[in-house]
């Protein structure tokens, strides 16, 4: 985004950035500026005076800083979680939730994307990244939930919207939860098949050895005879290693060499 302080205070903002702003900030922006045109993924606008221009610039700059900080923290936490999900799982969750926020029932859009992937049990509390622990929520409610539990989040919403509203929303969540479990089961089944293929290749390379390579609870585990290798959370997302027969064969070779 840039502002030109010439005869007229004009600006340019990427449409993706504008669409991704919080509802409050986007509303403030649209109420303050005058849209001139929208083309090539950019929106051109004019601002009535320099004071408003400086306020808007500062608000959006702070938004981008906070967003970068949040995404960096989210990515670092993501490494700590077990499990994996793919775009197909998010699409399935979107359908399961009927395109609505899990917590508030507000409408979610795919294009432009205006929702966040929420870990029901926060990663900091041991929550995984398997689909069974994921729901889609508005960006605002995802930030508000932060490290709260699902129970705590609904307690907050109850104070805001009343018991009857929360009761109705919880019924919606129960229906979604049943579908989430099926999505999770399907993803685990796909991963298990991939691990079984690797296991078969490794067994062929080391005939006579007792080798098991599978999902145990939420994590990946390799057993070579009586030696157990517990891989760290997030290993399943290291696809070049997790699904590489050569990589696992090297581990097996090292174990047998002891």
Image: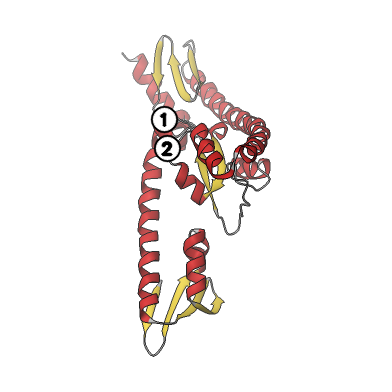
Answer yes or no: is residue 246 visible: yes
- Tell me if residue 209 comes above or below residue 173 in the rendering: above
Foreground pick, 88 / 97: 97
Q: Is residue 76 left or right of residue 166?
A: left
Q: Residue at x 52, y 36 (%)?
A: 155
Answer yes or no: is residue 86 visible: no
Q: Secondary structure at mark 2?
A: loop
Circle nearer the viewer, 2 or 1: 2
Of the 4 image quadrants, the one containing the C terminus is: top left
Q: How far from the left and from the top, in percent, is residue 117?
A: 52, 44
Q: Secondary structure at mark 1?
A: helix
Q: How far from the left and from the top, in percent, is residue 9?
A: 40, 83
Q: How far from the left and from the top, in percent, is residue 40?
A: 54, 74
Estimate how packed mark 1 is, as few (under 14), some (14 to 19) or many (20 or more) residues with alpha carbons within 10 Å: few
> Could you give the CA–CA distance between mark 2 and mark 1, rounded to whole angstroms?
8 Å
Q: In the current view of this chain or complex, which residue is farthest to the bottom?
A: 7
Q: In the current view of this chain or complex, which residue is farthest to the left?
A: 258
Is mark 2 in CB contact (under 8 Å) with mark 1?
yes
N-terminal of the two: label 2 or label 1?
Answer: 1
Q: Is residue 21 left or right of residue 57?
A: right
Q: Quadrant of residue 74?
A: top left
Q: Mark 2 = which residue?
A: 147
Q: Mark 1 = which residue?
A: 125
Foreground pick, 81 / 155: 155
Mark number for residue 154?
Answer: none
Q: Residue at x 51, y 64 (%)?
A: 16
> How is the structure coloured here?
secondary structure
- Tell me if residue 12 comes above or below residue 198 in the rendering: below
Of the 4 image quadrants, the one containing the N terminus is: bottom left
């Amino acid at each position: 985004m840039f502002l030109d302080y010439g005869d007229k205070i004009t600006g340019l903002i990427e449409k993706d950035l504008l669409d991704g702003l919080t509802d409050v900030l986007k509303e403030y922006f649209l109420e303050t500026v005058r849209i001139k045109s929208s083309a090539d993924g950019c929106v051109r606008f004019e601002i009535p005076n320099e004071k408003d221009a400086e306020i808007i610039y500062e608000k959006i700059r702070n938004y981008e800083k906070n967003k970068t900080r949040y995404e960096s923290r989210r990515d670092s936490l993501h490494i700590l979680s077990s499990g994996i999900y793919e775009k197909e799982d998010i699409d399935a969750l979107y359908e399961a939730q009927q395109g609505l926020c899990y917590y508030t029932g507000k409408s979610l859009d795919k294009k432009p994307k205006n929702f966040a992937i929420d870990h029901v049990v926060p990663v900091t509390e041991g929550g995984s990244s398997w689909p069974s622990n994921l729901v889609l929520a508005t960006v605002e409610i995802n930030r508000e939930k932060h490290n709260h539990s699902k129970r705590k989040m609904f307690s907050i919403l109850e104070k805001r919207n009343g018991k009857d509203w929360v009761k109705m929303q919880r019924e919606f969540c129960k229906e979604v939860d049943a579908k989430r479990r099926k999505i999770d089961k399907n993803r685990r089944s796909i991963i298990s098949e991939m691990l079984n293929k690797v296991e078969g290749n490794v067994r062929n390379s080391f005939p006579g050895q007792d080798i098991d390579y599978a999902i145990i609870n939420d994590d990946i585990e390799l057993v070579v005879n009586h030696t157990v290798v517990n891989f760290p959370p997030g290993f399943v997302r290291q696809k070049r290693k997790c699904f590489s027969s050569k990589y696992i064969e090297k581990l097996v070779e090292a174990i047998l060499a002891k």
